[in-house]
Amino acid sequence: MTTSGALQGIRVLDLSRMLPGPYCSMILADHGAEVIAIEDRRFLADGLFFSDLNRNKRHMTLNLKAPQGLEIFMRLAKSADVVLEGFRPGVVERLKVDYQTLSRDNPRLVYCSISGYGQTGPYAQRPGHDVNYLSVAGVLGLIGEKGRPPSIPGVQIADIAGGAMNAAIGILLALYARERSGRGQYIDISMTDGMVGFLSLPYFFARAEGRPQRAADTLLSHRFACYNTYETADGRYLALGAVENRFWSTLCDHLGRPDYGPLQYDEERREEIIAYLRRTFASKSLAVWEEELGGLDSCFGGVRTMEEVLDHPLFLAREMVHSYRDDNGDVRHGFGVPVKLSDTPGSIRTRPTAFGAATASVLAELGYDEAEIRRLSAAGVV
């Protein structure tokens, strides 16, 4: 086993900001890629620098609108394997750091653009955020209570699953293809495209059941007792996911209602069964139910808070929570590497870097001396 990571030797230049792009490059960095995150220091005032996403990376400041800044980036891009950006379509062309320009000097370059609605199509120039991509893709309309407005998830699904993860997949595919062709290629990632793909199962159920899928009224969203959430005596919640009848029947037997086993998807009795389980689960605390059901071969889980996750034995055992000290000596928590490879595992080698912390060292590697670096800083280039 090696600790260098599967992507050792791959250099990534990340021009993106906020969440989707930096999360993608964090995935690559966790698995050994050398990632240089590049931002203009004027963006620091926005307060949107998510330092946790910059573990295992170096971060430098660079003003691409300044001729000297563009020259520095071009020198970096000549030896890069991947360039990642998340601007609105057309911006990189105006900055002269687009794929067509960079690939002339570096034909092996893999270039990935993440945007809300893609580089083409009628929505290409439309601004947006996670909730907008979810809504346009039809996903938001399936989230929430029946008969009430859609609920905005507390996590950024489109940004991460539709953007960051699809971008990471696309980059890995392009790097693999490069091994055979010798050439890089361009990757167009639309976060909204990624969310449309999440409709696969709802679309299947709509055809199978012959009726539209609506929020909190589908086989996998509150319509039946076996796939539902229930309040416990202490105001906490428990989630059931007993889709297969063997799991559902096991639970019904345990609760003293074996007659409900064959009625799992009975339309006429479903509200009766849901009401029974609501009364039943409301009779004991979540901790008691977890102790009672823990050894049962059924599908359930307590609804955890984020604070509880940080101290949960499952995630501690899976190394999905780690602690480190920041620059002030305070203990901070971070999340581990979810993709676990046996021979080339990912790892957390360096803690999150400060904004622009590697600017001087990157420039020095390019041959700039200390006096030149000071002049570039004074001129606002870095």
Image (spheres, rainbow, N blue to C red):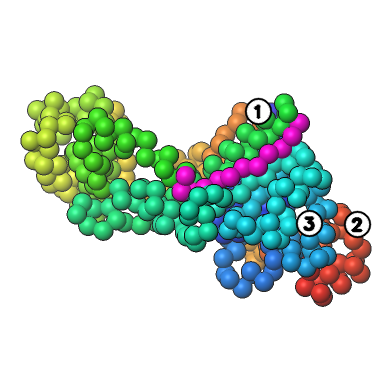
Q: Nearer the viewer, mark 3 or mark 2?
A: 3
Drawn side of residue 90 relative to residue 371, left or right: left
Q: From this viewpoint, is residue 266 visible?
A: yes
Residue farthest toward the front in the current orientation of the protein: 122
Q: Nearer the viewer, mark 1 or mark 2?
A: 2
Residue receiving disc 1: 343
Whichever of callouts 3 and 2 sits on the residue coming sooner in the sequence is 3
Which quadrant of the rendered structure holds the C terminus?
bottom right
Q: Amino acid at mark 2?
A: Gly
Q: What range is drawn magenta here?
A: 182-193
What element does badge 3 sit on? helix
Tag 1, which secondary structure? loop
Give the residue type that dot 3 points to. Answer: Phe
Q: Identify which residue is drawn at 69% across, 41% down.
A: 110
Query: What residue is shown at x 61% (from left), y 73% (from top)?
Result: 45
Do tag 3 and tag 2 residues touch (Cβ < 8 Å)? no
Q: Amino acid at mark 1?
A: Asp
